[in-house]
Image: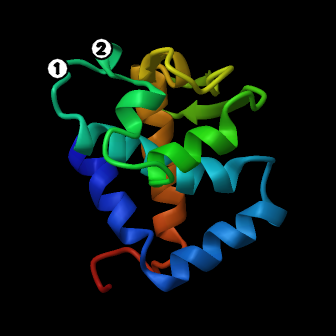
């Protein structure tokens, strides 16, 4: 899972993806650009920089932990910007199960020395499914065709 978020975060450095995320701000539902870019980078950075956790539900950060080296790095900027932001609700169709799945992304109420658990922001099962679906949609904007002759 960590590798998926890491590869996606690296791909976002590709110039056309920056334009896609900018376009999402006006062409898609509220917060989709922020979820497809900064939130996924946030998850990637937590998983990459704090590899001491064994399960999704154990992963947490705090202001002190995030700023152990210095302030205003990626995690700190994200938490300062989105702490207290309203919950964002999504739904996605799971064709193989023929059902709609509903999930929420919850931002921490405050950003201080309290522990901010990743599971409280995004539940692992539906959150990861949703993340992969959204990542694929964003990556697909750069694919001209898919098939045997491609």
- Give the total of numbered labels: 2
* Callout 2 crowding tier (Cα within 10 Å): few <14, some 14–19, many ≥20: few
Can you tell which mark lies on residue 58? 2
Query: How are the colours assigned in the image?
Result: rainbow
Q: Is residue 138 above or below residue 124?
A: below
Question: Is 80 situated left or right of 4 in this image?
Answer: right
Q: Secondary structure at mark 2?
A: helix
Along the line of sight, which residue is nearer the eye, 45 or 55?
A: 45
Along the line of sight, which residue is nearer the eye, 60 or 38?
A: 60
Question: Is 20 situated left or right of 1 in this image?
Answer: right
- Inter-mark Cα distance, 2 to 1: 7 Å
Q: Is residue 142 visible?
A: yes
What x and y, as percent, mark residue 144?
Answer: 48, 83
What x and y, as percent, mark residue 94?
Answer: 52, 31
What x and y, as percent, mark residue 84?
Answer: 74, 27
The residue tagged 1 is: 54
When asked about the image quadrant of residue 79, the answer is top right
Residue at 33%, 67% in the rendered image: 10
């Amino acid at each position: 899972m960590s590798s998926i978020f890491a590869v996606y975060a690296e791909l976002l450095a590709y110039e056309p993806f920056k334009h896609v995320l900018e376009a999402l701000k006006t062409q898609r539902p509220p917060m989709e650009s922020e979820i497809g870019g900064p939130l996924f980078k946030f998850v990637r950075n937590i998983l990459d920089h704090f590899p001491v956790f064994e399960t999704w539900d154990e992963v947490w950060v705090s202001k002190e932990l995030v700023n152990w080296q210095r302030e205003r790095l990626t995690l700190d900027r994200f938490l300062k910007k989105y702490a207290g932001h309203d919950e964002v609700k999504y739904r996605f169709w799971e064709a193989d199960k023929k059902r709609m799945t509903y999930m929420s992304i919850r931002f921490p109420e405050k950003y201080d020395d309290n522990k901010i658990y990743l599971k409280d922001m995004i539940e692992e099962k539906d959150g990861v499914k949703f993340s992969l679906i959204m990542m694929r949609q964003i990556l697909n904007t750069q694919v001209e065709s898919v098939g045997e002759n491609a």
